[in-house]
Amino acid sequence: MKIKLNDNFNNIAESYLFSDINKRVKAYKEKNPSADIVRLGIGDVTLPLPKIVVNALVKASEEMGVKETFRGYPPEYGYDFLKEAVARYYKLINLDLDLESIFISDGAKSDLGNIVDILGDNDIYIPNPVYPVYVDSNLMEGRKIHYLKGSEENKFLPMPDGLNNDPKVIYLCSPNNPTGATYNYDELVKWVDYAKSSGSLIIFDSAYEAFITDGAPRSIYKIPGANEVAIEVSSLSKMAGFTGVRCGFTIIPSTLEVSGVKLNKLWKRRQATKFNGVSYPVQRAAEAALSIEGIKECQKNLEYYKENTKMLRELLDEKGIYYSGGVNSPYIWMKCPNNMKSFEFFDFLLEKANIVGTPGVGFGEYGEGYFRLTSFASNEDTKKAVERLRKIL
Ligand code: MLT
């Protein structure tokens, strides 16, 4: 063929972080078929869906098989019943959302990756280390990225101090993936004030908000003025175990505009062209997960995972190894012992303890020398991992 390809793909890593890790683990498993591998790598949930969610999925699927209740294309932006459930979920933290600002999708990854479609050639500011989707999706568009360095000194919570006053697009993830670091109210006020004074847009990823236990804001909209500068992207993946079901939502308030052009008008146009909505049974399942009973059932699962973070934290405390996260987050971000590099530690853990984690450098250059463990395995597997780690760390 003689067509032109998107050369920006030359600027991104050949494979997505978690695909790369899978390949390495598969190769190890082929060489060592009897290895009892404990997976604390990708943040994928393992507990089954809450009963209330399954019942809603079944009921809605059955409706699809009956002439009177069958539904065709869903609305591109989500059924009102789910948007209302999202609004009620925000009401629990005393926030009022207008239904027009809520966009239902098949998950935060898609929205975070697609949002670049409505933005022009801005300077992009992205924390580092962070979820790789923000960087890759901007590089695919040929955008210029500046990194906001996370380090032990700033507790992996970069702040706007020292940034110039030019308008920019800023990504924030709180609780952060991978470090678990979570901005408190005052820190988010500084970011919102900075965005207002510089004319910048914040893209706030709140996918891990349900893990917050220390009173930190669970939404950027808790901060006065945030509805003039921030888009919020969230997900049911971790909160309700929807990694396989696929459902999330993005909030674009109608108060977000550039020279009279509303951002949510552009997003509506974008979604109507490139997205055909989320299936009816999945939206009913999400509605059930966001009901009061559903939230209670989901919280039980989160408590289960929290026992795992506790076991891992206690081990690292016992060994005197630095870590962040594990309190407001399912992730523990630990320093690799003996100055090992991230991938060196990955190989060491896989070979010596048959444990899979995620090398910190996969989340950006400032993640080098760190390593991420998740709490999404079973209690039994996590206990096994802790015992093995105790012997080798
Ligand atoms: C992770 O492990 O970082 C997440 O599971 C990835 C994701 O949410 O897409």
Image (cartoon, grey):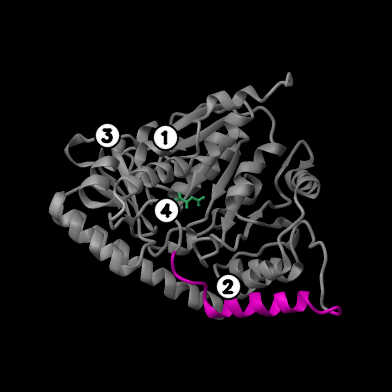
Label 1 sits on what residue type? Answer: Gly
The answer to which of 134 and 374 lies nearer the viewer is 374
- Quickly name the residue at label 4: 184
Q: Which mark is residue 289?
A: 2
**Residue at mark 3 to residue at mark 4: CA–CA distance:** 30 Å
Q: How dense is the environment of label 3, judged by Cα within 10 Å: few (below 14), some, or many (20 and up)? A: some
Q: What residue is drawn where x is 38% and y is 41%?
A: 24
Discs 2/3, front: 3
- Quickly name the residue at label 1: 364
Q: What span is in magenta?
A: 46-68
Q: Secondary structure at mark 2?
A: helix
Q: Earlier in the sequence, mark 1 or mark 2?
A: 2
Find out if the beta carbon at label 3 lies less than 8 Å from the nearest ligand 1 atom.
Answer: no
Q: Earlier in the sequence, mark 2 or mark 3?
A: 2
**Residue at mark 4 to residue at mark 2: CA–CA distance:** 27 Å
**Residue at mark 2 to residue at mark 3: CA–CA distance:** 40 Å
- Quickly name the residue at label 3: 341
